[in-house]
Amino acid sequence: MIDGTGVTGSVGGLGADGLGAGGLGAGAATAHGADVAVVLVAVILILVVAKLFGHLFVRFGQPAVLGELVGGIVLGNLVLAGYDGLSWLAHDPTLHVLAELGVILLLFEVGLGSTVRDMLAVGRDAILVATLGVVAPFALGYGVGAWLLPAESVYVHLFLGATLCATSVGLTARVLRDLNRIDSREARIILGAAVIDDVMGLVILATVVGIITAADGGGSLSIAGVAWIVAKAVLFLGLSLAVGTWLSPRLFRAASYLRADGALLATALVVCFGLAWLSWWAGLAPIVGAFAAGLILEPAHFRDFEVRRERPLEELIRPLGLLLVPIFFVRMGAQVDLATLRDGRVLGFAALLTLAAILGKQLCALGVWTRGVNRLAIGIGMIPRGEVGLIFAAIGASLLDPDGHHIVSPAAYSAVVFMVIVTTMVTPPLLSWGMRRGARGPGGSGNAKPTG
């Protein structure tokens, strides 16, 4: 049976033991300056590995994020080759904070790519696809966990279901753009559904985390308690979008009178980090607030800055993301223990979890009611879990159930990362094939109109 040992250890510093005989130096953590030096070297190493592996994967038609993840897996498993001098990378508290900032910025950028208006205009098909694309994978993930991990708590099964809910909209959008089908009916449904899918997935994540936190604090798993957690997540998102949509243009108009450099970026980060903090204060994951912050900001809010010829907000945020987001993915990869996959039971669990992830998203194509739409392509386009699946797994790795065990064990974490890698890698070729197949069929003419 898969053990319940936690993924994330508690490492207080970077002492000689953590660095190893072949590491960076025996007394690296003995002074503040040495601590900073070690972190600087760690960031240098992570960025170099992220870009080298990212380049390699892009050359083979895969997203750079997969290269960053695999690069982290290599760094974290050098112990299998007899070198343990970098094992501390996965658990260093300073890198953990940088990685958390990176994932908050990542969800902020994802939110910036959509607007509240986009969500309200996607139509019936996208809403049904998104709903089925959350319910079916969640049920299948829960079922796989309950079947193969019967000794684990119900909280583990819930979290496994939650990790299968999300869709990586960025990867699918890139493939559709490469195929010159970004304006097709299928693309509009997929991208609209993926945005709603992310919102629903974040609500489920907040609900599961709330249930686990309440149970860990001695609370009961009552229906009323679960309903309150769901309502709190929905209310937070709803109020954030409603108040933020009204307040945001006024806030940025006032900020436009500031003559200091970087006023646009600073104001946007205040909104992002402020909502992330409010989300944490409300008992939800900070990424929920960061995503909401991105959704409420629209280009029209920055018109006064455009008059001053300020660069667009996306261009200002991007360098921060290029620095911090790779730290998150490399660190997540470094937490994967490849030794756990030597166990045939763990490998079988990873394979079945991946199968559940793929089949669950295929069922969402049943939500398409418009005639002549390529349902196969829509189901395939919803498959990749990408960065959001990793974020969910990372949160699970940091939570404890009422018995004091980590919700996501090292073996389960490795299985989830295996699922993310496979679903992300198979999507580009499968989506290309599915779109071509639909173009040759009766649904590929493009004459049908989406409903909604």
Image (cartoon, rainbow, N blue to C red):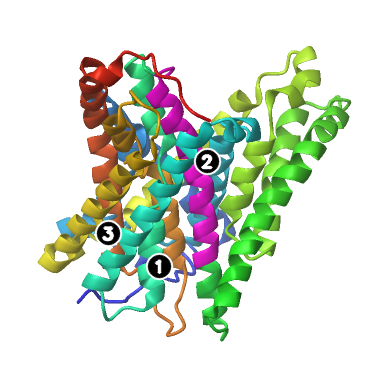
| Magenta residue check for 105 | no
Name the residue type under label 3: Ser
Q: Using residue 449 as the reference point, say whether residue 229 is left or right of it.
A: right
- Using the rendered view, name the quadrant where residue 340 is placed: bottom left
Name the residue type under label 1: Leu
* Mark 1 residue element: helix
Q: Give the vertical position of 288 relative to 428 (above or below).
A: below
On the question of residue 26 being in view, the answer is no
Give x and y (percent) for residue 52. Answer: 31, 32
* Mark 2 residue element: helix
Which is nearer the N-term, disc 2 or disc 3?
Answer: 2
Q: Give the vertical position of 235 relative to 283 (above or below).
A: above
Report the front residue among 291 and 80. Answer: 291
Q: Using residue 64 as the reference point, say whether residue 411 is left or right of it.
A: left
| Label placed on residue 414 | 3
**Spatial distance from mark 2 to mark 3, Cα to Cα?**
22 Å
Q: Give the vertical position of 405 relative to 207 (above or below).
A: below
Residue named by callout 1:
158
Numbered range of the magenta stretch: 182-208
Q: Residue at x 36, y 67 (%)?
A: 7
Prevalent SS, magenta region: helix
On the question of residue 176 being in view, the answer is yes
Dot 1 crowding, Cα within 10 Å, few <14, some 14–19, many 20+: many
| Label placed on residue 106 | 2
Report the front residue among 333 and 250. Answer: 250
- Using the rendered view, name the quadrant where residue 342 is placed: bottom left
